[in-house]
Amino acid sequence: TISKAGLRRILRAPLAPSKEPGGCRLLPPAWRARVHSDDLAMRKVLVVEDSASTRAFVRAVLEDGTFADKVGGTQVAEATCGFDAMRLLPRGPYDLIVTDINMSDINGLELIHFIRKSEHHRTTPLVIISTQNTKQDVERGLALGANAFVAKPFSAEQLRATCFKLLGVDAGG
C-alpha cells in the first residue's frame, strides 16, 4: 500500500515525455526543482550568503531529497549579498529565507529589519546562519524578527531540522 505522503508525492511529481506514444514518466526528485519551477506545491527559499561554498552547501541541503521530498519540492533562489536579496524579494513570495549576517553592502541584520517592515514578507520564516554567534548576536537577530539562529559551522541535519520546524513539517516519517 502507498502512504498518504507517498501518494501526495506521486500526484505532485512532474511528468516528462516518454518514448511511448502518449506516455509520460516521472522525473527523478533531483530534477523536479529545475524542471517545474512554477509548481505551486514547491517551497520557494531565498538563500542570502556571500560565501559561495556555504551558499552551495545550503542549496544542496534544501534541494536534497531528504528535505525536498518532505516539503513538496524546493526552488532555491540565491543572493550573494543583501543588495541582491533586495532585488530578489519582489520575485517572491518566499516560504523561507536563510541569511548570513556578515555581508558587504547590506548586512543580514539590516536585511531582516527591511523584511519585517515589508507588507509582503513580514511573516516569512527567517533563519540566520552566522559565525557571529555570541548570546548578544543571537538575541539581536531574534529581536529584529528572525525565527531561528543556526551557528556556523553547522551540519546538514541542523539546517534541515530548523527549516522543517519553521515550515511546520514533521521531519519524522
Image (spheres, rainbow, N blue to C red):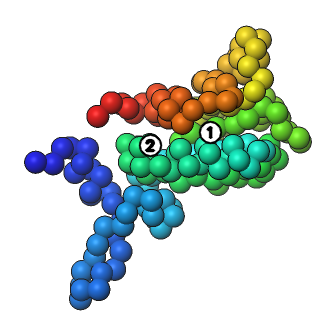
Res 81 quadrant in image: top right
Label 2 to label 1: alpha-carbon separation: 15 Å
The one of 31 and 83 positioned closer to us in this rendering: 31
Query: Which residue, as the protein is rendered here, is positioned at the far right?
Result: 105
Amino acid marked by disc 1: Ile
Identify the residue shown where x is 29% and y is 86%. Answer: 19
| Residue 67: image tag | 2
Mark 1: secondary structure: strand
Query: Which residue, as the protein is rendered here, is positioned at the far top?
Result: 135
Identify the residue shown where x is 71% and y is 17%. Answer: 138
Res. 116 visible in picture: no
> With 61 as the anchor, is 56 left or right in this view?
right
Identify the residue shown where x is 33% and y is 60%. Answer: 13
Res. 50 visible in picture: yes
Mark 2: secondary structure: helix
Residue 170 in percent (x, y) is at 36, 30
Residue 61 in percent (x, y) is at 53, 44
Res 169 quadrant in image: top left
Label 1 belongs to which residue?
A: 97
The one of 19 and 36 positioned closer to us in this rendering: 19
